[in-house]
Image: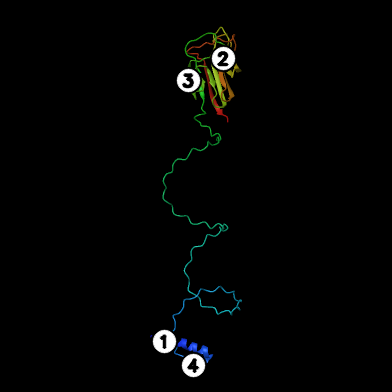
Amino acid sequence: MSLATAILFFTIVCHVYSTNTGDQNSCNTCCSSPAGIPGIPGTHGNPGPKGDNGAKGVIGLTGEKGEKGEIGKYGAPGKYGPVGQKGDVGQKGDVGQKGNMGTVGRPGSAGSPGRKGEPGPLNTMIIKSAFSVKSVGYKTGVLDQTQPIKYDAVITNIGGDYNLTTAKFVCRVPGAYVFSFTGHNMDNRDLAISIIKNNRRIVSSFSEAQSTSSTSTTLVLELVEGDEVCTAVYDSFKDNMYRHIFAEASFSGFLLYPTT
């Protein structure tokens, strides 16, 4: 029989005896025995329900200021703040060193046409205008009073303003011009020659039919661009011009000064 079994048996006997006699103490006396071996600890029970919050405690006294701690690590950069107001213009800095020449850029697109400029100064080579023309060889006969007197040869035509085909001077440069002519008549007929401006008779010169003689005149005309000047006989009664190698008819003109 093992010790545990013996103890169990002895306990049962004492219990029966105390029940029958009604004496609990006698059992305690007779049944006292050495304490048994502690049992194996039981498992932890489930946690109980959460209790109610306790009352707020009294605020404790302010503690003394602690010593300054060590500098912590730098934190992550914060977000950018709003843009501030524009500051005052700073002082002009010193001129920097000249940089290297850059590469040549591509040509830009053509700009809009500019406004028309003011007239420039007159070019002395352009404003020159002068001519002299004459008849060539022996010629006699009646001239048509409705047509300009035609000359055969150009002596001078600076600027090209005299047209030998039309027998007219055409103004290219506005200004004051000097014109002159010379003609000879036969001894049996009168001769009158006129200077014509734009189909209007300006001045005439007369040579009477008493002998071979000449007639001439000179005048100044103010012309504008496009004006035409020529010579013509006055009428059908004074229209016989004598032309010879020693008595050549001529017509001349030149620009005295330009006008703006």
Closer to us: mark 3 or mark 1? 1
Along the viewing direction, whichever of 75 and 82 lies nearer the viewer: 75
For the residues bearing labels 3 and 4, Cβ distance under 8 angstroms: no
The residues tagged by marks 1 and 4 sit, at their Cα atoms, a distance apart of 18 Å
Q: Which residue is mark 4?
A: 29
Name the residue type under label 3: Ile
Residue under pointer 3: 155
Query: Which circle's residue, 3 or 1, is located before the other in the chain?
Result: 1
Given contact means CB atoms under 8 Å apart, are the residues at marks 2 and 1 in contact? no
How far apart, in angstroms, are the residues tagged by discs 2 and 1? 182 Å
Q: Residues within 10 Å of mark 3 (few under 14, many from 20)?
A: few
Disc 1: which residue = 6
Residues 28 and 190: in front is 28
Residue 79 is situated, as x and y percent measured from the top left of the image, at 52, 60
What residue is drawn where x is 44% and y is 86%?
9
Point out the tag, 2 or 3, that comes first from the N-terminus. 3
Q: Is residue 137 above or below residue 172?
A: above
Considering the image in quadrants, where does the N terminus appear? bottom left
Residue 232 - label? 2
Whole-number angstrom distance, CA of label 3 to CA of label 4: 181 Å
Report the disc number at residue 48.
none
Bin the neighbour count of mark 1 within 10 Å (Cα to Cα): few under 14, some 14-19, many 20 and up.
Answer: few
Q: Residue at x 47, y 20 (%)?
A: 155
Judged from the image, the secondary structure of the residue bearing numbered disc 4 is helix
> What is the residue that sits farthest to the top in this orientation?
188
Task: Please state which amino acid type lies under the numbered disc 1.
Answer: Ala
